[in-house]
Each structure stands twice: as C-alpha cells, then as structure tokens.
Image (cartoon, rainbow, N blue to C red):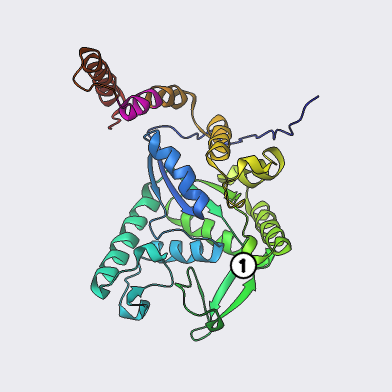
Amino acid sequence: MNFRTQISIKNKSNNLIDHRSKILLFGSCFTENIGDKLNYFKFQNTVNPFGILFHPKAIENLITSATNKKEYTEKDIFFQNERWHCFEAHSELSSSSKEELIKNLNFRISSTNKQLLESTHLIITLGTSWIYRFIESDTIVANCHKIPQKKFLKELLTVTEISSSLEAIISLIKSVNPKIEILFTVSPVRHLKDGFTENMLSKAHLISAIHNVIEPRNHTHYFPSYEIMMDDLREYRFYKNDMIHPNETAIAYIWQQFKNTWIDTNSIDLIAEIDSIQKGLEHRPFNENSVQHQQFIEGLQLKINKLQENHKITF
C-alpha cells in the first residue's frame, strides 16, 4: 500500500535558477527558511530587506515604495516602547535612534530598487489574508509593533482585493524588469491565533487569488509549499514543538521539491559539491593539530579554490 499522497509539481518555465541567477525573496517567515537554503548552497539572493511581511498589501506597498524610490522621513516613523518603528517594516529594523532608522530605511529601499531592476527571479511567499488597519491614519500596516490592538481594525482581504494587489505587484515589477520570473507560494505556517477556520479561509483566499493572476507565458508561476505540507506531509512529526511551524525535516523536504522543479541541472551538481564543503567546514576534529586533520583541511581548501576559480563561488 502507498501511505503517501505525493504531489506532482510541473514547472512551465524555461528560465530555471542557477548560481548565476539573482534571486529576491519577499514574504512570511517561510521565506526565511527558503532563503537559508539558498544561502547555504551559495546562491545569489536577498531575503526580506524590510523584514518579514505576512500579507500581500504589505508586499505591494514595499514594491511600490521601491520602484518609486521613496524617501523616508520623520513622518514615516513613530516612537513606541523606547524605540523608533516604521509601520511598513518589521520590528527587526526598529532602532533606539530616529536618525539610524531613517537612514536604514532609505538605504534598504534604495538597494531594493536596484535588486528589482537586476533580479532574474522573485519569490513571494504569502502568509495570511488578515490585515490590520491603523484607525488613526486609516492605513494598512505591515507590523503592529505591539501597539494596543484596540487601535487597529482587523480585516480579511477578499479574493478580489488580493488579486488586485497581486496584479499591481506584477505590473510594478514588470514595468522595471519585464523578463523577471515571479514565483508565488503560500506559507505552510498555520496562523492559528486567528482561529482554525479563519486560518483555512485566509489560506484559501490567497491560493484562489494567486491562481487568478498567474500565467506562465507572462513569467508568473505558483509553487505549492502549503499543499506539500498539508497533503503530503500531513503528520505532526513534521512540525516543531509548537505544532504550527514546519520542522527541519519538513523544510528540507519542501526545499527538495523546489530544487527538483526550479533549480537548473548544472546547479544541482554544484549543490552536492557545496554541501560536501559546508559539512567539511562544520566538522570539529578531536585533534586540530593532527596530520590527518591538516590533510583534510588542505583537501577542503582545494575544493573551495576550485569552486571559486570555476564558478566564482566564495565561502
């Protein structure tokens, strides 16, 4: 008997990812998981320059600001709990210095603009359809920064609203980089604080909206991260202790599916070499001064030098 319902994934793009590709990733915390894998295997990638962004409106706002080269000023930030914050960015960018935050926001928006122009692939991971609207300014925020919830209205974006947001994202990016491949996926992380039914409704809205806008002939695609987690890895042994986030085994499995469908064959061979080197660099010997270990280090360095010379890959 077959106790698996393995998902068949088809990629209709001819522009696969290799080590010459420039990859930009936006979105939820699962974006960080995929970004970590790309970093480990020495791809050229940038992950969440404004920190984790959970919903499509936050990503649309960032891409709008980046393409328009927005300049951040004091009116875009606020002081809360002894730190300066920006509603458009994750709290990891927050600072005790007002000047430092504004400088960092402007540096990151400028670099994001450059990356949008130069990237070959953009991966967007959507986490939720639920958004928070700051009542005082009637604006949708990317992060609430622990401001009391009574100051926000919680709303569920409709499929139509999400579709419009995604269409705006695609249009903005294509206006500055027509040949870029845009890959949407839905985070397998369940937002159970919203409620079980509310989470399922939220994910359904995201999936429906994405399929309203993708068109492989227009270089827009979908990768089923959420479906792999829900329908293939449908056991709690694939979750962390919180029973919400995928554990390392699940992340590795989803990465494997991504690699099989989106990574070029030549880079798959490189991945194996890089993995061998990475494991060698992590190796901790019993005796660092032994002849055997010194020979191991020399052999490892030869492998590194070869990759640097032939593929411009640095460690």
Q: Tell me: 154 left or right of 306.
A: right
Inspect the magenta stretch and tell me whether residue 281 lies in it: yes
Dividing the picture into quadrants, the one containing residue 276 is top left
Who is closer to the viewer here, 147 or 285?
Answer: 285
Task: Describe residue 110's horizontal placement relative to residue 201 as left or right.
Answer: left
* Residue 36 colored in magenta in the image: no
For residue 144, above or below residue 312: below
Q: Position of residue 160 (x, y in %)?
A: 68, 65
Q: Residue 256, how many percent across, how many down?
A: 55, 32
**Dominant secondary structure (helix, strand or loop) of the stretch shown in magenta:** helix
Residue 4 image-quadrant placement: top right
Quadrant where the image shows the C terminus: top left
Residue displayed at 65% across by 34% down: 10
In-image side of 216 versus 82 (left or right): right
Residue nearest the viewer, comparing 161 with 41: 41
Q: Nearer the viewer, residue 239 or 186?
A: 239
Residue that protrudes farthest toward the front in the picture: 286
Q: Is residue 180 visible?
A: no
Q: Quadrant of the image for the N terminus?
A: top right
Tag 1 residue: 130
| Rendered view: 114 above or below 256 | below
Q: In x, y percent, where is residue 275?
A: 40, 26
Q: Residue furthest bottom?
A: 136
Disc 1 marks which amino acid? Trp
**What is the crowding at mark 1: few (fewer than 14 residues within 10 Å), some, or many (at least 20)?**
many
Which segment is the magenta one? 275-284
Tell me the SS state at disc 1: strand
Q: How many discs mark residues in the rendered view?
A: 1
Q: Is residue 79 visible?
A: yes
Q: Residue furthest left?
A: 289
Which image quadrant for residue 42? Answer: top left
Q: Position of residue 78 (x, y in %)?
A: 36, 79
